[in-house]
Structures are given as C-alpha cells and as structure tokens.
Amino acid sequence: AKFQQKGDTYVPKDTTAIRQAARKAARLQDGLFSWHEVGDENPRVVILQHMFHPDDFAEEVNLKQELKEDMFEELGKLGTVEKVRIYDRHPEGVIWVQFADSLVASKCIEKMRG
C-alpha cells in the first residue's frame, strides 16, 4: 500500500462534534446515576436512609410490598406521592420517594428530621 497526503496542506479533523457528544453522554450519565432530577433547583425527590435492614427481607417475604404501601399511606398525608422505590439490598436501608411537588418534599424532610 502506498500512503500519501492529498493536496498541499494538512487539514486537521474537526473534533467539536465528538467533544459535544462526549459532554452530552457525560451529562446523561450523571443524570442516570444521581438521586434527583438533573437541573431541578427544587427537588421533588427525598432519599430516606436507615429505614430497614437488608436482612429483614430474607425473614419476611411480603415486607417490600408492605413497606411500599406504608410509605404511600404515611407520606401521602403530607401530599401526593408519585413513586416509591425500595432498595432492599442497599446496606443503608434506602427508600427513594418522588413527590408531585417540591414543597411536599420539603415537608417530608422537615418531618423526618425532627
């Protein structure tokens, strides 16, 4: 094979599109691995820790569903609860709760702190 330059001058490759795609992928990845929504100054998500021990789920089969229903019932008194996710294998006993409004999330944080 014979390699040679075409033309008289070297034209560097435009890498702005590649850099922009890499930045966009990094932002998407940050959003996927974060606890809250990206760009939301008033988060609607509350992370509750130390709500259970992972070994509790081995002892009782329906505990995850019961705990989820209890979260909807108790936190529903503060306002509208959209989603509840229970991370039953997390060592810190984490429950992720998304509210319809950031004010309700603030109320939840205040209630849980004291």
Image (tube, rainbow, N blue to C red):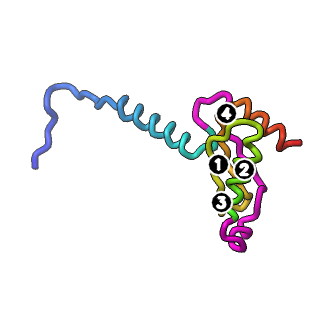
- Where residue 1 appears, as percent x and y from the top left, is 10, 50
At 62% across and 45% down in the image, what residue appears? 83
First in sequence, mark 2 or 4: give its number: 4
29 relative to 38, above or below: below
Q: Which residue is mark 3?
A: 65
- Where residue 67 appears, as percent x and y from the top left, is 71, 57
Magenta stretch: helix, strand or loop mostly: loop
Q: Which residue is mark 1?
A: 84
Q: Which residue is mark 2?
A: 71
Foreground label between 2 and 4: 2
First in sequence, mark 1 or 3: give its number: 3
Any magenta on residue 57?
A: yes
At 73% across and 33% down in the image, what residue appears? 104
Do labels 2 and 4 touch, CB within 8 Å? no
Q: Secondary structure at mark 2?
A: helix
Dot 4 crowding, Cα within 10 Å, few <14, some 14–19, many 20+: some
Any magenta on residue 40?
A: yes
Q: Secondary structure at mark 3?
A: helix
Q: Which residue is mark 4?
A: 43
Locate residue 22 relative to residue 42 in the image: left or right. Answer: left
Q: Which residues are magenta?
A: 37-62
Foreground label between 1 and 3: 3
Q: Secondary structure at mark 4?
A: loop
- Where residue 55 appears, as percent x and y from the top left, is 73, 70
At 54% across and 44% down in the image, what residue appears? 32
Dot 1 crowding, Cα within 10 Å, few <14, some 14–19, many 20+: some
- Where residue 102 appears, as percent x and y from the top left, is 69, 31
Q: Secondary structure at mark 1?
A: strand
- Considering every residue shown, the one lying at the far right of the view is 114
Residue 36 is drawn in which quadrant?
top right
| Amino acid type at mark 1 | Val
